[in-house]
Image (tube, rainbow, N blue to C red):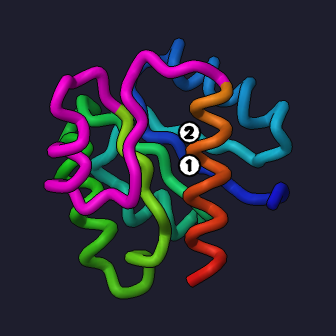
Amino acid sequence: MKNKTILIFDDDVNILEVCTIILVDAGYTVKISETSHDIIEKVTEIQPDIILMDNWIPEIGGIEATRLLKQNEQYRHIPVVYISANNDIHLLAEKAGADAYLPKPFDITELENTVERVLNEADAK
């Protein structure tokens, strides 16, 4: 399962830092972006196995960025975990076309378990 690359889109540098530390410690390669307007270019460059997408990210926002990815024939297979502090995160994730969601604040175990579960589901397809 390890040796997978995770691309995190979030404009909160503290979240990026914490998630990077946790996921690198768990054995993943982690790449980050503080904006989402160039999602296709970033995905082309990094070729992630999974994406963690914040809802409130500058430029076009998490919903639009996720939709752009899911409309792209080459990259629609990449699972997206939607991350937000919104109470209606499940609705936002559904609207975006995300594969899963993780409400903020989350704990280390929740983050690791969600990433692992979504990667396992993607590998099973």
* Residue located 47% across and 44% down the image: 52
* Residue located 56% across and 83% down the image: 125
Nearest to the observer: residue 69 or residue 38? 69
The answer to whether 15 appears left or right of 66 in the picture is right
The answer to whether 97 appears left or right of 40 in the picture is left
Q: In this rendering, is residue 23 above or below 21?
A: below
Nearest to the observer: residue 79 or residue 120? 120
* Residue located 31% across and 79% down the image: 72
Residue 46 image point, x, y percent: 61, 61
Mark 2 burial class by Cα count in 10 Å: few <14, some 14-19, many 20+: many
Residue 94 image point, x, y percent: 20, 55
The answer to whether 124 appears left or right of 43 in the picture is right
Q: Mark 2 falls on what kind of element?
A: strand
Q: Which residue is mark 1?
A: 7
Residue 32: assigned label: 2
Nearer the N terminus, badge 1 or badge 2? 1
Q: In this rendering, is residue 44 above or below 20?
A: below
Q: In this rendering, is residue 65 above or below 68?
A: above
| Segment tinted magenta in the rendering | 84-108
Disc 1 marks a residue whose amino acid type is: Leu
Task: For the residues labelled 1 and 2, say whether their Cβ atoms are less than 8 Å apart.
Answer: yes
